[in-house]
């Protein structure tokens, strides 16, 4: 399927969604795209030929990035000093710099004009993104040397921009009709999400979709954001506004669609993630599953390091997330109340309702080894981690 055909299908699906309502026609027409799955047991492996083959399997990088400005949303949650059992961050919850660097090298080789690395850094200060990487003991020169023109942007505030860019949710959404984000998410031709796949305490799992939640700047969606205008500096957390809806964002930003809707974060966060992936479409998703962790999105004592030994890449963010869930031994079509969505709605199915993509594995071509042969059983670890959590915190 060509880019133009994908785009027409996507737009026609979005046109069928009105005011965030459930429109079966939109879900029925939600696009899918092939997902490349490859075994890779170690970061010491030459990742360039592996990723090169995977990108060829999904249609090639050249058609996506040649002559383009490429924005790459990293997944650096938990802060640069947050570790699980003294393991390097890139072995548990951050995508590995070798994977990022290999991907950037291939993009440059395919003709990308400029590559921007983006993240709303954990540090509550307006430092350059590079400072966050230095604090994690990462060699930033790996990225600078991967392509001729590389830029970095901390998207937790205005950064190098003069105003925030507004991204409207096609069809209107459920929680917010639009989001105000750093200019870098608009000033690009191609948008890439690279992340680990992990469990998540609020939304069940975190993959290339949940990664987009980190686009939201604390200056607008943080606890300490002023009433009228965005803060100048990032501070606070997203809990009050986005998780629990205890307050509205500044008057300069779009207000909630329905302030009387559920304040349950298992209702709100999956919808916000679905809205974000609809508002800021992802052109390429890459998931680092060589090593990761089970039991949560941020390191805590109950989490367990795991080594699935796989990489995934796809042009549809929902298709890629769905295959990642299958590798984790989860059902991407599961409803609320079932594993791994015991206390939350399924964000993949919500994104399907917005016409972004379908999580139906029967419609998704997986190129590579059969998923059943690549499974790393996160589901089997859940009772173990729940017992640890109960012993440590007094709750399951």
Image (cartoon, helix red, strand yellow):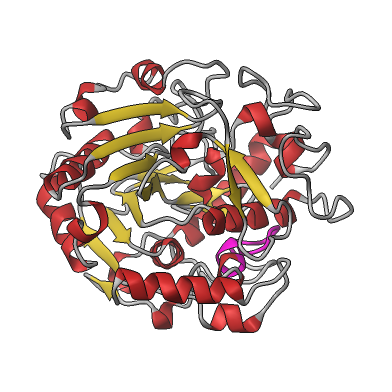
78 in relation to 194, above or below: above
Q: Residue at x 11, y 46 (%)?
A: 109
Extent of the magenta region? 339-350
- The image position of residue 338, as x and y in percent, is 64, 68
In this rendering, would 92 be left or right of 42? right
In this rendering, would 20 be left or right of 42? right
Give the quadrant of residue 55.
Answer: bottom left
- The image position of residue 286, as x and y in percent, is 33, 52
Q: Is residue 344 visible?
A: yes
Q: Given the current orientation, which residue lies at the most extreme front position?
A: 162
Magenta segment: does it hold 344? Answer: yes
The chief SS type of the magenta part is loop
Report the front residue among 224 and 68: 68
- The image position of residue 59, as x and y in percent, is 21, 67
- The image position of residue 273, as x and y in percent, is 59, 53
86 in relation to 328, above or below: above
């Amino acid at each position: 399927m060509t880019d133009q055909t994908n785009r027409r299908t996507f737009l026609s699906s979005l046109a069928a969604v009105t005011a965030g309502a459930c429109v079966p026609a939109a879900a029925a027409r939600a696009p899918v795209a092939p997902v490349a799955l490859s075994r890779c047991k170690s970061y010491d492996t030459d990742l360039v030929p592996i990723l090169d083959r995977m990108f060829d399997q999904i249609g090639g990088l050249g058609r996506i990035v040649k002559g383009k400005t490429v924005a790459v949303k990293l997944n650096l949650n938990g802060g640069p000093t947050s570790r699980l059992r003294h393991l390097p961050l890139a072995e548990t919850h951050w995508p590995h710099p070798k994977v990022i660097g290999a991907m950037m090298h291939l993009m440059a080789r395919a003709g990308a004009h400029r590559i921007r690395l983006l993240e709303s850094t954990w540090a509550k200060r307006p430092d350059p993104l590079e400072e966050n990487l230095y604090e994690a003991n990462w060699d930033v020169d790996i990225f600078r040397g991967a392509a001729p023109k590389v830029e970095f942007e901390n998207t937790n505030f205005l950064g190098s921009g003069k105003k925030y860019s507004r991204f409207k949710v096609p069809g209107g959404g459920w929680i917010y009709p639009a989001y105000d984000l750093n200019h870098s998410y608009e000033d690009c031709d191609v948008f890439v999400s690279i992340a680990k796949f992990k469990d998540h305490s609020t939304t069940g799992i975190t993959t290339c979709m949940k990664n987009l939640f980190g686009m939201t700047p604390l200056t607008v969606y943080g606890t300490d954001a002023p009433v009228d205008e965005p803060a100048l500096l990032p501070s606070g957390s997203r809990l009050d506004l986005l998780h629990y809806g205890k307050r509205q964002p500044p008057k300069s930003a779009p207000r909630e669609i329905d302030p009387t809707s559920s304040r349950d974060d298992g209702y709100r966060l999956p919808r916000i993630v679905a809205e974000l992936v609809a508002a800021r479409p992802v052109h390429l998703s890459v998931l680092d599953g060589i090593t990761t962790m089970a039991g949560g999105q941020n390191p805590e004592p109950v989490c367990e390091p795991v080594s699935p030994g796989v990489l995934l890449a796809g042009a549809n963010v929902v298709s890629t997330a769905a295959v990642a869930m299958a590798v984790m031994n989860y059902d991407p079509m599961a409803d609320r109340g079932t594993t791994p969505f015991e206390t939350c709605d399924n964000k993949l199915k919500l994104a399907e309702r917005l016409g972004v993509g379908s999580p139906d594995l029967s419609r998704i071509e997986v190129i590579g080894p059969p998923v059943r042969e690549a499974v790393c059983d996160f589901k089997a670890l859940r009772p173990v981690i729940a017992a640890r959590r109960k012993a440590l915190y007094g709750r399951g």
